[in-house]
Amino acid sequence: PPAPSPTPAPPATPIDPAALLPQYHWRLMQATDANGQRIDALFARADKPLQLDFRDGRLSVGNTCNRMGGSYTLAGDTLTVGRMVSTMMACTDSKLMALDQEAGKRLEGPLTLAATQDGVTQLTLTTTQGDKLMFGGDPTAQTRYGGPGERVFLEVAADTQPCSHPLIPDKQCLQVREIQYDEKGIKTGTPGEFQHFHDGIEGYTHEPGVRNVLRVGRYTVKNPPADGSSRAYVLDMVVESESVKR
């Protein structure tokens, strides 16, 4: 009898890059030049890979020496990044200084874009010189929590305080209060008393003796576990930091 014909693979779901790019933090996994050689200069920070974020028509480049960014446009499979601008800090590590230059020259201009979502979300950018940069996608907080978060400012006191918890003896809680700013960035109103903060703040590690003001995203957790919070906090940036003398 004739051999059964193979079952055709289901067609791949088409990916809309314009919708996909802002949903993830893109972290560099592999980078090779036109000859297939690894571009070592792009891996100056083994613990913090080069990261791209696309939001509101702008590309931000993170985990470099300076914060870098530029506008971007999409047309089919072509991603065009405009002139990059950056802060002007000097880094003591020469490899980090070189990372800025190496990343900038490869990300400016037209890039051929390919994205896949077969279990793992990946983005590949190919330069006109044939350099190939492959990024893995890590969902943003907005993607994970299914909606935009509320931007809030939290002041975190220098020292934690004991707080009762039925499952964690000797638990220490951050001491936190919310701060209000006007549209010009001036503090307004009088902040309330510091309160025990039982939740965590994703991306923030408290250092004893250091007072911080944090800009965070506050998200609603859908169907939280019975012992979990209905809110999630994700660090956006540290606005102020001060060592407090004891």
Image: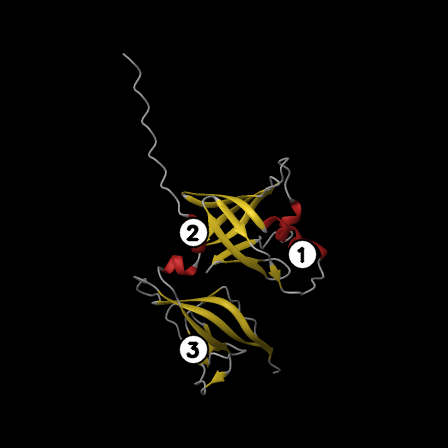
Find the residue positioned furthest to the bottom: 190
Where is mark 3, residue-wise?
196
Which residue is found at the position 43% from the left and 44% from the top? 120
Where is mark 2, residue-wise?
18
Residue 85 vs residue 162, the one in the foreground: 85
State if disc 3 and disc 2 touch (CB < 8 Å): no
Where is mark 1, residue-wise?
96
The local crowd at label 1, few if under 14, some if 14 to 19, many if 20 or more residues have their Cα within 10 Å, is many
- Where residue 14 sits in the image (x, y, percent)? 37, 42
Frontmost of labels 1 and 3 is 1
The amino acid marked with disc number 3 is His
Residue 3 sits above or below residue 241 on the image: above
- Where residue 246 sits in the image (x, y, percent)? 61, 83
Which residue is found at the position 64% from the left and 44% from the top? 39
Q: Is residue 19 left or right of residue 239?
A: left
Does the image show residue 60? no
